[in-house]
Amino acid sequence: MFKRLEAMPGQPARPVVHIDFTGVTVPCRAGDSVAVALLASGHEVCRTTVVGGVPRGPYCMMGVCYDCLVTIDGQANRQACMTPVRDGMRVERQQRAREISS
């Protein structure tokens, strides 16, 4: 379903960086969002719902739906579609309810 476009002729290729997704090293391009990196590598599920454990993945890709919540470097409730990758980043599936801060 998700296909990465090749670089335009004359454009330099973006450097490859690596993130860790649930113990698996995922190569991705600098400048990708975490959601794009996961989808491009075949990882479609970012979290499971609290009620029923239904798998959810990136949907809107613009920070509106919150279906792509993940834990990044130990911090829960991060939107994968709005977070750029960084070399060495640790990403885990979100396994609990989203917390609302006051």
Image (cartoon, rainbow, N blue to C red):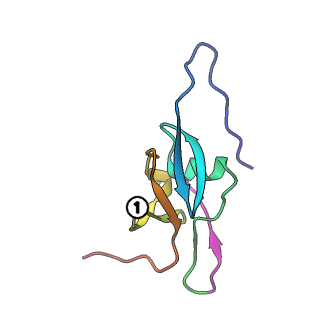
Number of disc labels: 1
Q: Looking at the figure, which quarter contains the C terminus? A: bottom left
Query: Residue 14: percent from the left, percent from the top?
Result: 53, 29
Q: Badge 1 is on which residue?
A: 73
Residue in view at x 66 percent, y 58 percent: 43
Residue in view at x 45 percent, y 53 percent: 89
Say what secondary structure mark 1 lies in. Answer: loop
Give the side of residue 55 with respect to residue 50, left or right.
right
Residue 11, compared with residue 72, is above or below; it is: above
The secondary structure making up most of the magenta span is loop
Give the side of residue 82 with respect to residue 53, left or right.
left
Query: Residue 66: percent from the left, percent from the top?
Result: 49, 65
Residue in view at x 49 percent, y 37 percent: 30
Q: Which residues are magenta?
A: 52-62
Instruction: Judge by depth and name the residue closer to the eye, 13 or 54.
Output: 13
Residue in view at x 44 percent, y 51 percent: 82
